[in-house]
Amino acid sequence: MIELLLVDDEAYVTESLARTIPWGELGVEQVYQASSGSGALQILEQHNIDIIVTDISMPGMTGLQLIETASERWPDLRCILLTGYSDFDYARKAIQLQAFDYILKPVNDEEFIRSVSGAIESLRDEWEAHDRYHLLLYNRKADYSVLRGKLMHDLLLGKRMSERTLALKLKEYEIPFDTGAEAVMLLIQLGKHYTAMDPGSISLMEYAICNIAEELFGHRFRVWFSKAPHDCLILLAELSRETLNEIELLDNYEEIRHELLKANIASFRESVSDYLKGEISLVVSEWFAFPDEMTAAYRSVLSTVYLAAHNDSGYVLFLKDSHLQEQQAIRPLDSLYRPPTLIHLLESKQWEAARQKLEDVFRDMEGVRFSREHLYEVFLSITNAIMYIAHKSGQFILQIDQHAFDPLIAQNIISSFDKLQVWAFELLERLKTELLESDQNTKSYIVKQVHALVGSDSGHDLSVKTIAEQVYLHPVYLSKIYKAETGEGLGDYIIRMRMERALYLLKNTNKKVYEITTELGYQNPQYFSKMFKKHYGMTPNEFRDG
């Protein structure tokens, strides 16, 4: 869980934020308050603060000086500036100090929540990167397809990330997409010729289709190809910069863009048929803003596959020309998309809040005239959230629901309001059971790893940081897991084990105190004696003399 510090010399500002912001829903466990920069530094010394929100204009140490000092000592700290000054010099200085965000007073709660949520997301991404580090020791270049696929899944299933985080990932994974640009989504289904193959052959066919798409579309478009969560292929396309510069100022720009897309799709299908001897079907979304409207576009194309009931292979359907698009545009279920989203609640394991979210959605549905498309919209949003959380936790979705992702079973679930409601709550309970068991097993294993490391011959030389490196976790995250599982701080446990080792050496060997000091990893015999006395009530020499 996240710990956050609010700093402002005007106490009513921090008090108001502390009382009015729904911290628990954001995943913030503890909120501290300070009225000065020096007071903030003391709290930072005493607690594992993850995020600091500070006013700029304060007597003594300013907010800019505070984050400069704090960032040097705690480089993983996320800093958000809060100020009534809109002068650009402050913003420029904040950027130079790599502050995470910059908010003007008076504070707008929604803007504040977005900023804090972005900082939390940034921290969790960093922690997750450490968790997965041992899985990525092999060549990153060779694994880019996996990383790109995971990012694609996150965006398709509704994962929200800050513009900065996404831009970094796009650059790191060499995905040539521009945030804010218009993109189009192609959902690709393999025909009967492919589905009769064994899984290995299907994977080879998908790889070949990807190569054909990238080669053909690459002349006019920037493309990103991936296997989608719901057992189909997804091709995202943006116009290349050269093509965009060539046609964007023309009066019939949209018409030309559409014809370019149609021509590339025709060549693509023809090439697949010629080289791979099988047909493919495509559903093509309308153009949308990447990445903000990507999840909605995915729901649209996926809904069309289910609802349009195309049984023949080899079709192309543009939602731009489809009457289904009009039906799907009706969105009366505000509670389904109102923050905090279901994905956010499941990600932070707020099970009761997630259940309440579903209750709100179904209550709202009872108050409107809903159609079968609305039932499917709810079904798809829930499955997207469940699938995202399951995959993130290393679970196969079939462990949680063996049937709901079968199109025929899905048709039965969305055939009535009551069936959908029963299914949703049962699925939530199954997910909770699976993840709690998995989470407990993982945490217990981590604690066993820590005990084995500290209990080894070289364990007296270890610190929280070096242990964290060996178990591939962030030091702060490891400390929180250990404290939650054992009730004892990890640093306290390490010291206790050192003192027990010291007691044994003093009792069973003739080693000098300074030799024991060195063996236990302490630099100063006086400091070692002080720690020993604090632990046992006497100095090492007094213990031996007694």
Image: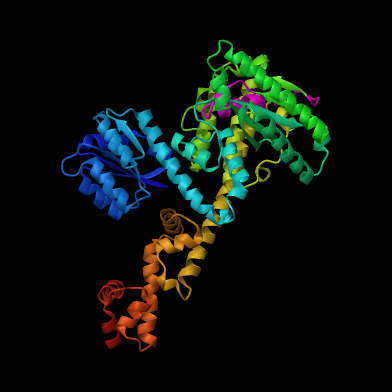
Q: Is residue 531 left or right of residue 190?
A: left
Quick check: can you spot residue 191?
no
Q: Nearer the viewer, residue 506 or 315?
A: 315
Report if residue 484 is visible in the image. yes
Q: What residue is rendered at 36% in x and 85% in y? A: 507
Q: How has the structure been colored for display?
A: rainbow
Give whichever of 48, 518 is nearer the camera.
Answer: 518
Number of dots carrying numbers? 0
Q: Residue furthest bottom?
A: 510
- Work out whether 359 lies above or below 43: above
Coordinates of residue 53 in the picture (x, y in percent): 31, 40
Quadrant in which the C terminus is drawn: bottom left
Q: Quadrant of residue 510?
A: bottom left
* Residue 481 horizontal/vertical position (percent): 45, 55
277 horizontally vs 20: left or right:
right
510 above or below 367?
Answer: below
- Residue 295 percent location from the top left of the image: 57, 29
Q: Is residue 13 magenta?
A: no
Q: Nearer the viewer, residue 29 or 304?
A: 304
Magenta segment: 285-314
The image quadrant that residue 8 belongs to is top left
Check the image and name the residue furthest to the left: 59
- In this rendering, the answer to whether 103 lies above or below 34 is above
Whole-percent x and y of residue 504? 39, 81
